[in-house]
Image (tube, rainbow, N blue to C red):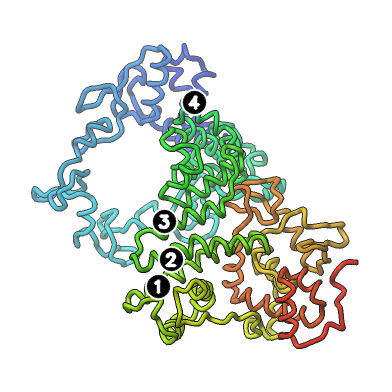
């Protein structure tokens, strides 16, 4: 408790106890607790003491309508405890209510009466709103008043044409220059708008935000905590060194720290989550109790404070709790907000509220159900069998050969969309696929060169099934050295990933792994702790059949990533756990975007690594290290145009 706070409290206690009943019956100790609860800050306590010193009314008997809100709340509190006191009445309705505003005629009124007094239909916009200006029989709301030219005048201090806040004898002042609003900040020294004064003097909004939202080392004891209490010499220190009660104490747990309103973030998050689950039925609350426990122990309580009210996933969860939506995969599949439903599904599966399923195939089939209907008959007759049978069969074959990757179903969707766009182009040209000549395809690919890769699958199917007789399938590009960086640019990027600390950590790890092994970003995204063997002196990584040793600085970077805080799964095996999808890894596209923001192409980086490795490694180890097939590895060796007489000491014995 500050010195000023203590003096004001002592003065208020003395005045109230001197008035006798009921204050003497309450007792000094209980009355002290009431006053501290009503006025926790020094400024509020000083305001309370100032009124008690200047008024001639007996607080408990005269029902003074001019008493401040703190005194009114004090009277109401002891009245509820059974003490006989008189409460002030509203001058308009005559009821014993909290008086919050002084009207234009000087009387005090409750909130409802004040609103009725100043609220009527605006003569300009026609809306029923609080009236800000009445002039010449015309009533204007604040929004309409601010639009008028006479609402803005040249400020006497800054000479800018702004809204008038205060009118003085010398001239008008804007809100930024009004008296008591702008002073030199005691912390940054800049002349800015004053936010608060209880942090050692006039404090601007930016400095106050830093003080109340930052844990830093106390200049006296070096303890990392909230440094927001004023010491005897006027400097800021922690509450222990200052010897005063902090103004940032949580009303729930009593701990000092960064707060959301009057509560610390863990308490505010707990309250928000419990309120979300309180609306649910008993059966659903029992079924989703593991999810509630997981949310209560979320490592980022600051985000959980706002999550129940702002997140679309939380809205779907509230519907499930109220049994408006079934707790099933099918119900989540049918929800129109697909991304929010998908994120909630991951969380429900992770805590055991839903049984796991193959989301890849389920999501792809659901996407086909939405993508295929509504097409013209000419397109639907070709697109349906191609997407339902050929794309699905080839995707299953690719999964059996190479395993399921993040890009498996992305590629399948792109093939379907590419086929649809080509068929829509033919339909617009009034040309049937069976009669379309090769020139139509050539002109189309000339205008849409990016369609070449994915359209090849549809054209091959159309030719084999007899739906296209005059169009030849597009040849495949199996290994193109133009997709790789020149060696000097490749070395520059590898050096930068090794030494540049300004690059995000996961981008450095992805760049080094892609540049060392020629693996795609999805490989980095799927790394787990079990793939890493760290003895302290050397680290090996197993992404193929046999492990290989990592060279510096990759081991140090991976150790830093392992120490990074986890958002959902603290014990997750993923090296890069997703911050949104519980139980899964970060999507590979995030790594691609990180490298793209640096100006680095992961395809060109991988191409340079493959050329470098193909020139020095046998086909078998090359295929195992890079994850490509033996045939593709042999083709890369042809591209590299070099024998593998020198075998690098990269693999383990």
Query: Crowdedness of circle 2 by 10 Å Cα count: few (<14), some, many (20+)?
Result: many
Percent of width and height locating residue 581: 57, 50
Q: Number of marks in the image? A: 4
The residue indicated by pointer 3 is 370
Residue at the (65%, 66%) spot, across then down: 521
Quadrant containing the N terminus in the rendered view:
top right
The residue lying toward the viewer, choosing from 6 and 634, is: 634
Q: Is residue 562 visible?
A: yes
Tell me the element at label 2. Answer: helix
**Which mark is nearer the camera, 3 or 1?**
1
Residue at the (42%, 87%) spot, across then down: 439
Is label 3 in contact with label 1 (beta carbons under 8 Å)? no
**Which mark is nearer the camera, 4 or 2?**
2
Q: How far is the residue under mark 4 from the one under mark 1?
A: 53 Å
Q: Is residue 306 visible?
A: no
**Which mark is nearer the camera, 3 or 4?**
3
The residue indicated by pointer 2 is 383
The residue lying toward the viewer, choosing from 291 and 306, is: 291
Could you say which disc has been placed on residue 423 in the image? 1
Percent of width and height locating residue 563: 73, 53
Most extreme residue toward the right, as rendered? 653
Q: How far is the residue under mark 3 from the one under mark 1?
A: 18 Å
Q: Is residue 593 left or right of residue 635?
A: left
Q: How far is the residue under mark 1 from the one under mark 2?
A: 8 Å
Q: Is residue 588 left or right of residue 529?
A: left
The residue indicated by pointer 4 is 282
Q: How far is the residue under mark 3 from the one under mark 4?
A: 35 Å
Q: Is residue 136 left or right of residue 56?
A: left
- Mark 3 and mark 2 lie on one chain; the one further toward the N terminus is 3
Query: Crowdedness of circle 4 by 10 Å Cα count: few (<14), some, many (20+)?
Result: few
């Amino acid at each position: 408790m500050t010195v000023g706070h203590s003096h004001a409290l002592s003065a208020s206690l003395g005045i109230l106890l001197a008035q006798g009943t009921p204050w003497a019956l309450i007792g000094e100790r209980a009355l002290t607790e009431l006053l501290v609860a009503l006025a926790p800050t020094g400024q509020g306590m000083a305001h309370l003491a100032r009124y008690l010193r200047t008024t001639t009314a007996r607080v408990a008997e005269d029902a003074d309508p001019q008493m401040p809100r703190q005194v009114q709340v004090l009277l109401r509190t002891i009245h509820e405890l059974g003490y006989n006191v008189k409460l002030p009445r509203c001058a308009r309705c005559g009821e014993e209510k909290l008086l919050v505003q002084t009207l234009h005629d000087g009387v005090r009124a409750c909130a409802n009466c004040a609103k009725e007094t100043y609220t009527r239909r605006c003569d300009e916009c026609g809306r029923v709103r609080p009236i800000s200006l009445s002039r010449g029989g015309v009533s204007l709301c604040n929004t309409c008043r601010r639009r008028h030219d006479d609402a803005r005048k040249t400020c006497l201090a800054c000479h800018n044409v702004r809204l008038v806040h205060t009118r003085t004898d010398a001239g008008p002042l804007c809100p930024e220059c009004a008296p008591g609003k702008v002073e030199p900040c005691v912390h940054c020294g800049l002349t800015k708008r004053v936010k608060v004064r209880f942090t050692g003097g006039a404090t601007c909004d930016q400095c106050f935000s830093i003080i109340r939202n930052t844990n830093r080392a106390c200049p006296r004891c070096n303890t990392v905590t909230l440094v927001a209490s004023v010491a005897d010499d006027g400097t800021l220190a922690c509450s222990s060194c200052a010897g005063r009660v902090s103004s940032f104490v949580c009303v729930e747990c009593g701990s000092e720290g960064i707060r959301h309103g009057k509560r610390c973030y863990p308490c505010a998050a707990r309250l928000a989550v419990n309120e979300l689950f309180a609306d649910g039925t008993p059966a659903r609350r029992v079924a989703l109790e593991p999810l509630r426990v997981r949310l209560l122990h979320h490592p980022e309580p600051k985000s959980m404070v706002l999550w129940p009210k702002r997140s679309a996933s939380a809205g779907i969860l509230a519907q499930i709790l109220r049994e408006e939506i079934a707790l099933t995969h099918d119900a989540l599949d049918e929800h129109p907000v697909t991304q929010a439903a998908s994120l909630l599904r991951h969380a429900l599966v992770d805590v055991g509220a839903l049984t796991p399923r193959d989301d890849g195939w389920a999501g792809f089939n659901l996407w086909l159900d939405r993508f295929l209907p509504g097409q013209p008959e000419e397109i639907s007759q070709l697109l349906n069998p191609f997407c339902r049978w050929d794309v699905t069969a080839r995707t299953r074959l690719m999964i059996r050969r190479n395993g399921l990757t993040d890009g498996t179903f992305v590629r399948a969707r792109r093939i379907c969309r590419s086929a649809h766009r080509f068929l829509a182009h033919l339909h617009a040209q009034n040309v049937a696929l069976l009669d379309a000549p090769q020139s139509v395809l050539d002109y189309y690919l000339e205008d849409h060169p990016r369609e070449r890769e994915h359209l090849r699958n549809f054209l091959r199917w159309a030719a084999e099934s007899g739906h296209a007789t005059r169009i030849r399938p597009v040849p495949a590009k199996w290994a193109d050295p133009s997709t790789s960086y020149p060696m000097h640019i490749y070395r520059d990027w590898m050096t930068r990933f090794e030494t540049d600390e300004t690059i995000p950590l996961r981008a450095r790890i992805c760049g080094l792994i892609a540049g060392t092994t020629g693996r795609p970003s999805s490989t980095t995204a799927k790394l787990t702790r079990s793939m890493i063997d760290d003895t302290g002196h050397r680290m090996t990584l197993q992404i193929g059949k046999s492990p290989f040793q990592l060279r510096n600085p990759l081991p140090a970077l991976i150790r830093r990533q392992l120490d990074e805080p986890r958002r959902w799964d603290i014990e997750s095996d993923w090296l890069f756990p997703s911050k949104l999808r519980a139980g899964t890894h970060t999507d590979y596209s995030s790594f691609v975007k990180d490298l793209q923001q640096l100006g680095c192409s992961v395809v060109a980086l991988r191409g340079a690594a493959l050329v470098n490795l193909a020139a020095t490694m046998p086909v078998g180890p090359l295929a195992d290290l890079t994850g490509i097939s033996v045939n593709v590895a042999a083709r890369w060796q042809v591209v590299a145009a070099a024998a593998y007489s020198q075998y690098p000491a990269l693999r383990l014995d």
